[in-house]
Amino acid sequence: EAQVTQNPRYLITVTGKKLTVTCSQNMNHEYMSWYRQDPGLGLRQIYYSMNVEVTDKGDVPEGYKVSRKEKRNFPLILESPSPNQTSLYFCASKLRAGGGIYEQYFGPGTRLTVT
Amino acid sequence: AQSVTQLDSQVPVFEEAPVELRCNYSSSVSVYLFWYVQYPNQGLQLLLKYLSGSTLVKGINGFEAEFNKSQTSFHLRKPSVHISDTAEYFCAVSIIQGAQKLVFGQGTRLTINP
């Protein structure tokens, strides 16, 4: 089954404790992206990747890091989480960016609470 | 830069009644337009999209949307809703060139009452 998976689905952590949220897709997609969803703000893009080893900042990149060493994986790293990073996070992927319009597939979400 | 405004944060309707969820966008360049649905505790699912051509677009689950370029709107409609349509709905735009980043509206929570 074609899908985007995220782990963990729920995470409660404390301020300053480094964490990684994993994202994996099995559709051989070139483009992957991370969003955060906050009430009244919709989804905002954190980082995106056009292909392996190619990443770029989205609209709200502060406090986050990403890497794209393999095509299928796009982990989101919070080096020193703070309470304002408490949010619902979504990973998404699509075949490629540009050259046409391709549907973006979303993972199930990771609910992160930072205390 | 592009922006999307969903004019209603919450819309309560009775089952089998019609519904319209409003979306307006702003962009200096041509865009693609989308509606996504998020059911409770799930990710986003594409409902429909407008790329070009006919301004009336039909999607899944009986939803349709109309693109109005002069009013920069892309309102979502369904003639008769069901309890299963209870969800949050997001309007989004993407410029045609480049990375085609999705820019989302704030979301509209649709609640269907029996």
Image: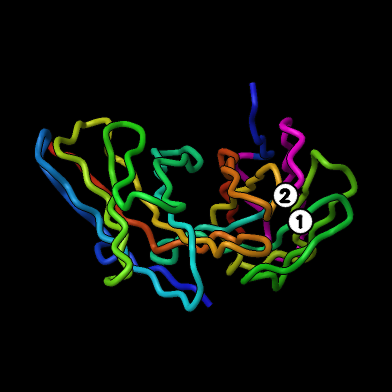
Q: Are marks 1 and 2 on the same chain?
A: yes
Residue A73: x and y in percent read 80, 42
Residue A92: x and y in percent read 63, 46
User: In the shown orientation, is residue B40 left or right of residue B97?
Assistant: left
User: In the shown orientation, is residue A87 left or right of residue A26?
Assistant: left
The answer to which of A46 and B6 lies nearer the viewer is: B6
Give the residue pinned by disc 1.
A49
Q: Which residues are magenta?
A: A9-31
Element under disc 1: strand
Identity of the residue drawn at 72% across and 49% down: A31
| Badge 2 density bin: few <14, some 14–19, many ≥20, Cα 10 Å | many
Q: Amino acid at mark 2?
A: Tyr
Answer yes or no: do the residues labelled 1 and 2 have beta carbons within 8 Å?
A: yes
Quadrant for residue A23, please give it: top right
Q: Chain of mark 1?
A: A
Q: Amino acid at mark 1?
A: Ser
Quadrant for residue B105, please give it: bottom left
Residue B69: x and y in percent read 33, 67
Residue B114: x and y in percent read 11, 33
Identity of the residue drawn at 26% across and 66% down: B7
The answer to which of B61 and A106 lies nearer the viewer is: B61
